[in-house]
Image (cartoon, rainbow, N blue to C red):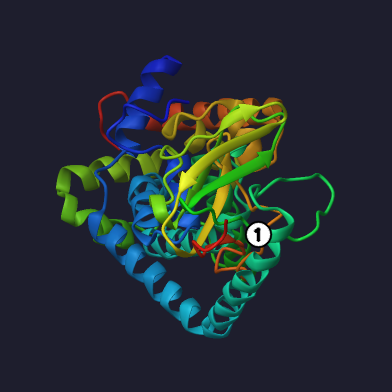
Amino acid sequence: MFDDDRLDREVRSAYRQPADDAAARRALERVAFQRARAARSWRVPRRMAVAAIVAAMLAVCAASVLRPRRAGTVARRRPAPSVTYAAPSHVVEFALVAPHAQRVAVVGDWNGWDPQAAPMRRAGASWVVAIPLARGAHVYGFVVDGGRWVSDPKAPTTPADAFGFRRSVVVVDGTST
Amino acid sequence: MTERGTSEPPDAALVVAARAGDEAAFARLMMRHHAGCLRFARHQLGDPVEAEDIVQDTFIRAYRALGRYHERDGFRSWLFRILVNRCRSFARRRQRRRERFVRDDAALERATTADGAANAAIARRLEHALDGLKAEYREAFLLRVGEELDYAEMARITGASEAALRMRVKRARDHVRARWGSDGRV
């Protein structure tokens, strides 16, 4: 009679057959097909994304007057809309209020959405970081504690993507003082 | 969890990249977890063809639901929760069709022939040992013994209590032990 450990080892050995690479490829192909089909159905939202970016560019003018050097400041309650500022050096300061977070990073199209690329530093209840950005519109978000995505509640966002996810938008025009 | 100094990025980093639109990141997640999902589904359902379809469906659902994923669950646990639910739904549909829940030897042969006769024989031996187990016992046994999940993680995946899962695993182990055979033969 087998003891539990020996039985489990033998069962596990039989259970863990070699990976079926062909089946994995078929799964990839099917997901890719579904993704392509979903992308076709998202043409209208993508046009809406362009509209959101244009709106953000218009809003940046007001933001540069009202809040010239602070962007992405987060409040628990719904804040007034604002957009990241554009300084002559194109350095944008991002901020997120997250008093209970252990680590926060800003990810965006400029850093390949890499959570390791731009860790933020704690400043009281907030997390801040200054990032030099090229002129133009950028999309971004915050990653809290390694995996939780948070949009910037003070910035405009794109329409929800296929994941139901909204990205924040920052416009750097390089003309502000 | 360490996220630095490893050649392979952790699941959480790949999820972030996938959410941001990095299709390669989601493909890497799929390749990382496909083998585990497929072997579970094959042994849970006893039907390799349906298992492959259900795993594909699981990944599509995971892709669509990625925006609702929270790291506290662990990506693998989250994925297995979807997979287990898909397997249960399939089993219910099969029951409604009044099909018997039996192993499909022909399908099993087709699915494992590429891996060689030895692997096919090993797979048959395990299927023989699992044959006749109630679905919830088989599910708990495969998650515990096959996937080496702890009971807390199993509870999150299955929705059953840890005490119930321990009982299911014990009963399943007794069933398998009686049919396993000490000489390696079915």
How far across and how far down the image is residue A133, in percent?
44, 53
Q: Looking at the picture, does residue B94 appear above or below residue A102?
A: below
Q: Judge left or right: residue A19 versus residue B71.
A: left
Q: Quadrant of residue B77?
A: top right
Q: Looking at the picture, does residue B118 appear above or below residue A41?
A: above
How far across and how far down the image is residue B29, in percent?
39, 49
Q: How many marks?
A: 1
Q: Quadrant of the C terminus of chain B?
A: top left
Residue B102 visible in the snapshot:
no
> Which residue is more in the foreground, A173 or A141?
A173
Residue beneath disc 1: A64
Q: Within 10 angstroms of label 1, few (less than 14), some, or many (20 or more) residues?
A: many
Q: Judge left or right: residue A172 versus residue B43.
A: right
> Which residue is more in the foreground, A102 or A177?
A177
> Which residue is more in the foreground, A110 or A149?
A110
Which amino acid type is shown beneath numbered disc 1? Ser
How far across and how far down the image is residue A84, in percent?
61, 55
Residue B121 visible in the snapshot:
yes
Q: Judge left or right: residue A46 versus residue A152.
A: left
> Which residue is more in the foreground, B11 or A177?
A177
Residue located at (45% from left, 32% from top): B176
Residue located at (65% from left, 30% from top): A101
Which chain is indicated by disc 1?
A
How far across and how far down the image is residue A2, in percent?
39, 17
Q: Residue furthest right?
A: A77
Q: Quadrant of residue A147?
A: top right
Q: Looking at the picture, does residue B60 appear above or below residue B7?
A: below
Residue located at (43% from left, 65% from top): B53
